[in-house]
Structures are given as structure tokens and as C-alpha cells.
Amino acid sequence: MRETRNILGWLGMAEEQSILQDAKKHVEETYKTVAFFADAVKSFIKGDLAAKAQAIENVRESEHQADILRSKMITELSEGMLLPPDREDLMHFVKTLDKIADWTNGAARLLGFIEQKLPDSVLKNISLGTDLIVTSISKLQEAIIALTKNELKNAIVLSTEIDHLEHAADDQKKAMIEAIIHAKLEPVSLLLTYQLAEYLEGVTDKIEDCGDFIKVLAIKSK
Amino acid sequence: MQFFVLIGLVLLTGAAVGWSIGANDAANSLGTAVGSKVLTLRQAIILIVIFGFLGAYFQGAHVTKTIGKGIVPLDQLDKNLSLYLALVASFAACVWVIIATHWKMPISTSHSIVGAVAGAGLAIHAPVKWLMLKDIFLCWIFTPLGSAILGYLFFKLLQNSLYRIIPRRYLKPVITLAVVLSGCYVAYTWGANDVANAVGVISGSGVMTAKMSVVFGGLAIILGIMTWGYKVIETIGLEITRLLPIMALSAQLASAVNVHVYTLLGIPVSTSHSIVGAIVGVGMVRGIRVLNFRIIKDMILCWLATPFISGVISYITLWVIKLFVKI
């Protein structure tokens, strides 16, 4: 039914496209948040505390920009005479996108608190967990772009790949917790590192949630 | 033989334009009633077919006369020439409608056929009535504005008075009935104004009488509704337009009254622009934030480009034909 040139149908679809374009910008900002977090992790592993602090500040700023975009999108979704077909799904999608940036910011804050030099096994797992997040968010970005270009099959394939990455992140969290247990850390570092493991896995969960909404939007668009 | 082939092609292209009108624009009348479950899809189709045809039959001749004789006086041209002009104008309008459908652009068939007739007239140096074109163009601007104003006023009036006049227990059935009746009125005025887009040039060139041509056009429109239009009605009604019944009633009444006035004046206007203007007008009661200016800008560009592009297509087509055929 996308072939319709009926004006009411066009208006609904045009609004939907406009909101998807904004979602694209939001995910770009969210991607930056994750990229800055990856920089913070690299600096932490190298022991460069100044660079780590700067990267964490960048994460905070980027997350704030993503919040502004989210507010704008929610305002747009709540206005307009003719509703796009999937307004409710788009609203959930926007909120879930925002959680990715929120959780990344949370992980960055925890990283900022960790001052003790951690064992290589734990650092390695933090690095692997971060790599999974970066890969997942890249896939999510590609999936949203595919959706805006109406490449629905591609969008669904990419969303499925995000699912696989989330499973890998679950396994990675298990490995990280094992490394933390065996590292015999100080109580404060233990608590913070464990929380960091939770947050790292939580970010990929939120990315997977977004991927699920992309599948819904893609299937409904057919 | 060539003459009859020409007549056949004129009728075919006219039917194609009529089919397209039925396929795409029928949803504007009772789509909202289907969406709010006031009518089933089958009931809506039956009503649109009946009232659309009645509009075409009883009042389609006004605008048919304008398109057939009011822009380029086809009845005053050589018979062969008028047939070629009719064929090329319908063809050009048809081509632009197909392109617009492929690109999913919301163009108006009224704008398309007017531009195509003028373009074909220029190609053969026929006397184009520029004053009439100017009046039509002005009416195109006033169409969405007028229906927006009417929509605003009707909604304000109904919102303030309906709940005071009608007892609470009768409110829902009365509003439901009013939505259906106003939707039928929209279908009637749509048939009355839009049938001319398909058959104006057929009637003007003398292939059929005005009455026969509106029946022919009405049947083409019905074919469009039955073969494709019902899918559009279902999509628009169930997925896109979610208006409260009182808002739908106000918008439909405003649009129908607006188009009816222009129909009686014999002016071909866009019924799509009218319904959108009316919906915007109704929405303006809530404030200006209902307008998405980015999308409105795209819509206006489509509206402005359509008569020009279809005019260029018909001009070039007839110019090429003249190279091969002695007209």
C-alpha cells in the first residue's frame, strides 16, 4: 500500500519519514556517546587518567545532546493533525533509543569512580564488553538508515545480527564476573566493577530492544 | 479508420484518468467513517460508488464544460485537431499521474488536466483563455484556505452547540449518522467536480455529449474504486486518519461545501487539497502546533509544479506528433 498517492496517506507516511530522520540523528548522537565511552575505557586501560576524565565528560555532554533530541522527537510525535501509522511504536522506539545513551552515561560514571588499577583479565573483559557495544550500536545505526531508505529486508537482517551480539554480550558478562571474582579486588572496586559489568550488558540489552522495534516498524511497513 | 482509432484512444486515456481518480481519491470521503468503525469497508464502498456517481451525473457537467471548452475552446477547433488535443491532454495528465504514483507524490488530477489542456493548446497555437486560467489558479489557492476557514468555523460551532442541543443518550448515534451523511456529501461533490478531469476533453471535442461523458467518466471512477480504491480506503481509514467523529464531521462538511461552491461555478479544484485544508482548519482549533511546516512545504511544491509539468508533457507530446502527423 506504499504505492498510494492519496494525500491523507502521503501525509501520514511523510510524518513517519520525518520522525525516522530525527531518529537517525538521535542514534548518531547515541553512537558518539558510545564512542566516547570506548575512548574512556581505552584510556583507563592505558592508565591515562586525564584522557579518561575528558572522555567521560564527552560522554556526559553527548548524552545531554541525545536527551535534547529525544525531547524534540517526543514533541513532534505528540503534535500534527494526521497521525503516522505507527506513532505508538515510534514513541517506544524513541524512549528505548534514549536509554542506550543513559546507560552508557551510567557506565562512564562508574568508570570514573574506579581508581584502583585492575588486573589484566578484568581489563580485557571490560574491553571486550565495550567492543560488543560499539559493534551493536554500529549495526543499529545501519538498521535505522536501512529503514529510512525503505530497505526493509536489510533492516530486519541487521536487527537479527544485533540479537546475536546481545547473546554474545550475555556470555561476556558471565566471563567478566568470573574474572572479577578471581581478581580478589578491594570491596569498593569489586562493587564498582561488578556494577560496570551490569551496565555494559545493560547497554547491549537496550540496543537489542531498539533492534526489536526496528523489526516491528519494518514488518508493519511492508 | 484513423479517426475511430483516435476516438478509441481518447476514450481509453480518459478512462485511465477516471480509474486513477477512483483508485486514489475515493478514500477522502468515507475513509474516516471506516476508521472509526461507523461503517464497514463494504458499506463505505457502496455509498462512495452511489454518491460519487450521482454527483458526476447530476452536477458533473459544470466543470466538464470548463475543461472541455473553457480553457481551450475545443468545440471551435477542427474536429481532427480537437481529438488530438483531447488525446494528448488526457495522455499527459495520465503520464504525470503515473509518475506521481510511482514517486508517491500527492498531486491533484484537476491541476494536472488543466495544465495539460493549456500545454496542448499552446502547442497547436490554439486560443488559450488566459483569464479563465488565472481565475482557476486563484481558486486553487483559495480552495485549501477556504476549507480551512470553514473547518475551523464548523468545528467551533459544533463543539459549542452540539452537546447543548442534543440529549446525551442520542449524541453518539446522531454524530455517527452525521459523519456518514457528510461523507456521502463529500463523495457527491467529489464525483461532481472530479469527473470532469477524466471526461472534460472527451465532451469538449464532441466525442460524446456532456451527459454521456459524465456517465462514462463516472463508470471509470467506479471501476477505480472497485479494483484499487477499496485498498486505499482501508489503509487510510484504519491506519492513517484517526480523527474524533465530531472533527471528521466538521472537516467533511467544510470540504464538501467548499468544493460544491466551486463545482457550481464550474471551476475544477482539488478535492484532496480541500479535505486537507479542512482537517488543518479543524486542527487549528487546538492551535498552530498541528501544522508540520516541513511537510506542508513539500505539498505546496507538488501543487505548484503539477500544472506546469503536465503542461510541458502535453506540449512536447503534441509537438512531436506534429512532426509525424499532419494535423
Image (cartoon, grey):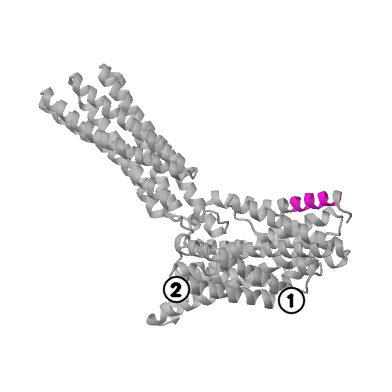
Q: Quadrant of residue B200?
A: bottom right
The residue under the point 45% across, 47% down is A19
Q: Which residues are magenta?
A: B311-322
Q: Which mark is residue B38?
A: 2
- For the residues marked 2 and 1, what is the alpha-carbon distance in whole angstroms? 34 Å
- Asked whether the beta carbons under mark 2 and mark 1 sit within 8 Å of each other, the answer is no
- The amino acid marked with disc number 1 is Lys
- Queried whether the magenta region covers residue B318, the answer comes back as yes
Q: Disc 2 sits on a residue from what chain?
A: B
User: Is there any visible trace of residue A171 in the rendered image?
Assistant: yes
- The amino acid marked with disc number 2 is Val
| Nearer-the-camera pick, B202 or A77 | B202
- Queried whether the magenta region covers residue A156, the answer comes back as no
Q: Position of residue A60 (x, y in %)?
A: 32, 32
- Structural crowding at the residue carrying mark 1, measured as other residues with C-alpha within 10 Å and reported as few (<14), some (14–19) or many (≥20): some
Disc 1 on helix, strand or loop?
A: helix
- Structural crowding at the residue carrying mark 2, measured as other residues with C-alpha within 10 Å and reported as few (<14), some (14–19) or many (≥20): some
**Quarter placement of the C terminus of chain B:** bottom right
Disc 2 on helix, strand or loop?
A: loop
Identify the residue position indicated by label 1 in the image.
Answer: B211
